[in-house]
Amino acid sequence: MAWCPICKAEYDNSDICPDCSVDLITGNEKDYTDIFTFPDEEISLNIYNHLMELGFETVHYYYDSNDKVFHIICEEFEADDAGKQIYFFITDNLNDTLTPSEKAALSEFTDNIFNENADRENISAYVSAKDKYADVHSSASSLLIVGFIGLIILVLDLTGIYRFPFSGTSRILFLGTMGIVFVLFLISGIVSLRKAKALSAMISRETDLEKEITAYITEKLNLSPADGSIDENASDEEKYLARTEYIQGMVKNVYPDADEAFIEHIIEKAYDDIF
């Protein structure tokens, strides 16, 4: 089945949409996402060719005469990587050849890509106490269950209720080794359970600290020095970097013991509300 990227109609035996005159795309429409939209054909085509040279398999390029813009689309699983490559290509190759209006349009696009990637990086760098607790508690439960069931099976063998198909020295080595392994599972499970208990106590403290730091940033911190140091022609990316660096430094002075990734996580959440 093939579909038209403009009207979304599906066709069984055709390569071109008879209504929109664009090449049909094979696959499921729901799997695709629009990663780049721009009115200039040369720039759009250069970016498309660059992505094809890099080996992106699901990238497609078409012109929508209704909106008078060129589109580059791909399947969801390639969207993030393709967006990053578009960002690098624009910042490295196109800035010197653009008109002011084109620079403004592409600057907005690259700023959006930058902020999305920054957000993902901060999320991946910071793991909340609640998430840590869930992971450790799950591991503890698994270790305890396996260790407990394993020891029960060994006891069943020793009492004659169930016998493993081993005898002599092999039987002794097997039972001894498995006994040690299952005891270690139980010990590891108990240790993890204690760690989970400590993390459980941290959850409320971390939540309170996040609220406190957020209130400091949004209500008490003077943000004018951050904007005062930014050039009026600076891009959104440059403004973002200057502001977050300033806020992070001020927060670190007031809360020196707070984890840096934790502070970055809070700043990222509060950034859009502030600016």
Image (tube, rainbow, N blue to C red):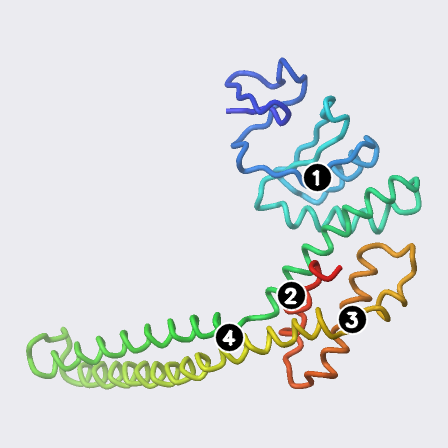
* Residue drawn where x is 64% and y is 81% of the image: 258
- Foreground: disc 4 or disc 2: 4
> How far apart are the two marked residues, 4 and 1, measured between alpha carbons?
42 Å
> How far apart are the two marked residues, 3 and 2, measured between alpha carbons?
14 Å
What is the residue that sits farthest to the left in this orientation?
160
Q: Is residue 174 left or right of residue 125?
A: left
* Residue drawn where x is 74% and y is 22% of the image: 65
Residue bearing mark 2: 122
Residue bearing mark 3: 245
Q: How many marks?
A: 4
- Foreground: disc 4 or disc 1: 4
Residue bearing mark 1: 52
Q: Secondary structure at mark 1?
A: helix
> How far apart are the two marked residues, 1 and 3, measured between alpha carbons?
36 Å
First reached walking from the N terminus: tag 1 or tag 2 = 1
Q: Residues within 10 Å of mark 2 (few under 14, many from 20)?
A: some
